[in-house]
Image: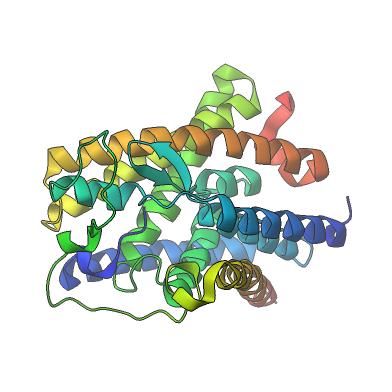
Amino acid sequence: METNQFVAIGLVVAILIGVTAVFFAAGDPDGLESTAIVILGEKDLFGPTPEDADPEAVGHEGSFEYEAPMPDYSMGEEGGKMGEVIAVVVGIILALLIVFGVGKAVAASKH
Amino acid sequence: MHIPDNFIPLWQSAIYWVIALIFIALALRWARNELDDEKVPLIAVLAAGIFAIQAFNLPVGMGTTGHLVGGALAAIVLGSPYAAVFVLTLVLLVQAVVFGDGGITTMGANIINMGVIGGFVGFYSYQGILKYAKNPYLSAGIAAWLACFIPALAASVEMALAGTYPLVEGMIAMGVYHAAIGVIEAVITAGAIYLIASARPELMQSSLGATA
């Protein structure tokens, strides 16, 4: 398969996975957050996660907090599913471009 | 498995950043030696795919979801653990800076867990298992499971050092959840490697060996 074709098909597959993820992804917290909720005593190891559980409550006070422009892969509450689709597609393209750019720059530096 | 900012005290985060930077420098050296104009677009699209599979929160039961890491996938496809460090570092950078997934101060720890530990465990366990299993897809699946499970245990040790999780409770919960998530990681990694090997067999000759 030609490189251009491989990249085009790969990008389409990535975007399809990302968009599917927006509509089919489960809302429960991931493993690290679930562990935090277990540690906080709000969840059993094998039990369901309560709606109002806050995994960040296990963290340390007075630490650095960074505000991301598209927090949690969304455009905020009013952005809805469309905002999430935009966010995930932006992320996929950014990942592609940044690895392409750094890869090109590093590959060019050997001359 | 992305650790948020306030889960690790700043001074400990700084230590993880220093260790991560050493591996990033080695990964850049790998990239300078290995990447050419032909391979750069391929690694870029692999990074796009890894970003996409990480975005998928798959239900694993127990009130928990899992997303894939992709460290074993990158290391096996590109034939080096440093490939995983290179790709995962840049993917984690986008995730933290643009989407707030994983902290900025804790990015060093996240790079160590998913990129360095995930990449090295994925690559070397793949090589070792392949010798006996003789099947690249089965070997890749087992390696991917280990490359999800072992970084999760490493993260729980870091959480214990940070005073965020108690050691035993943290290791049990992280271990149980990521043992389940790792099964999905194993299936998707083996499938992705099969598809990439079918589309671009020459890309993977060095990692699949004569058995492919």
Residue B173 place in picture, x, y as percent: 24, 39
Viewport quadrant of the C terminus of chain A: bottom right
For the point 61% across and 60% down, which residue is it? B47
Name of the residue lying farthest toward the right: A2
Instruction: Describe residue A23's horizontal placement relative to residue B116 as left or right.
Output: right
Instruction: Describe residue B45's horizontal placement relative to residue B68 as left or right.
Output: right
Instruction: Describe residue B65's horizontal placement relative to residue A84 as left or right.
Output: left
Residue A39 place in picture, x, y as percent: 15, 47
Vertical placement of residue B111 versus B143, above or below:
below
Quarter of the view holding residue A47: top left
Vertical placement of residue B201 versus B22, above or below:
above
Q: Nearer the viewer, residue B200 or A63?
A: A63
Q: Nearer the viewer, residue B47 or B1?
A: B1
For the point 62% across and 34% down, which residue is it? B190
Instruction: Describe residue A29's horizontal placement relative to residue B26 as left or right.
Output: left
Q: Nearer the viewer, residue B203 or B169?
A: B169
Residue B71 place in picture, x, y as percent: 50, 49
Residue B168 place in picture, x, y as percent: 14, 37
Quarter of the view holding residue B169: top left
For the point 13% across and 43% down, which residue is it? B167
Q: Nearer the viewer, residue B124 or B173?
A: B173
Quarter of the view holding residue A105: bottom right
Vertical placement of residue A50 versus B18, above or below:
above
Residue B57 in view in this figure: yes
Vertical placement of residue A80 versus B164, above or below:
below
